[in-house]
Amino acid sequence: MKKLLAVLLCFAMLFALAACGAEQAPAEQPAETPAEIVGLVADEEVILTFEGADVEQMTMGEFKALPMQEVELSRTNSKGETVVGVYTGALWADFATAIGASPESNIKIIASDDYQMAYTPAELNAEGSIFAIAKDGEAISPADEAGKVWFCASESLTANYWGKYIVKIVVEGE
């Protein structure tokens, strides 16, 4: 009887030590979503506003729900440096349909620094032109900066047609 009591006491002490002092295995972290991998902002964050369209704003999630395309483009900047990358985003025709505008509309983009540029349907719909949110699998703009979307112009156009850090699009009609 004393041996049984001693064994039970030992088990009780081991159990108590395990419960109090044992380190727990770290909780498994959930797998990263593609948006987190490329450093994009939360799907709920408003990334664009519109004037002259059927919708007033678009979130990152709504943008990513558009048919996504990948386009390899190169551009030579004003310093003579050529940048090549694979840009991921939406074609103007898909983008226009989503916001209730005609793909044959003229637009004006407004960047986070108030830079403005106008585009015609020929430029917007040129083969390879894309509204991009990522370059080479990475966010095109840092997560803490405004302007998550760039207009990356077709290689048939010059680098002067590129628009960066877009925060607003004004649809001006056909």
Image (cartoon, rainbow, N blue to C red):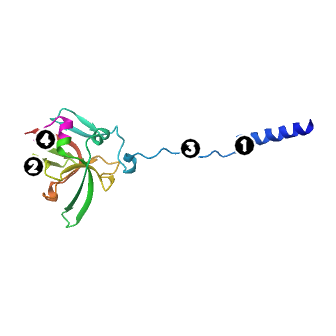
User: Percent x, y for residue 156?
Assistant: 13, 58
Would you say 58 lies left or right of 33 here?
Answer: left
Residue at 10% over, 39% down = 172
Q: Which residue is mark 3?
A: 27
N-term-proximal mark, 1 vs 3: 1
Camera sees residue 137:
yes
User: Percent x, y for residue 48?
Assistant: 25, 41
**Vertical placement of residue 152 versus 1, above or below:** below
Question: Looking at the rendered structure, which numbered label has been put on residue 18?
Answer: 1
The local secondary structure at tag 4 comes to loop
State how far apart marks 3 and 2 are (Cα): 53 Å
Tag 4: amino acid: Pro
Tag 2: amino acid: Ala
Q: Which residue is mark 4?
A: 103
**Residue lying furthest right:** 2
Question: Looking at the rendered structure, which numbered label has been put on residue 58?
Answer: none
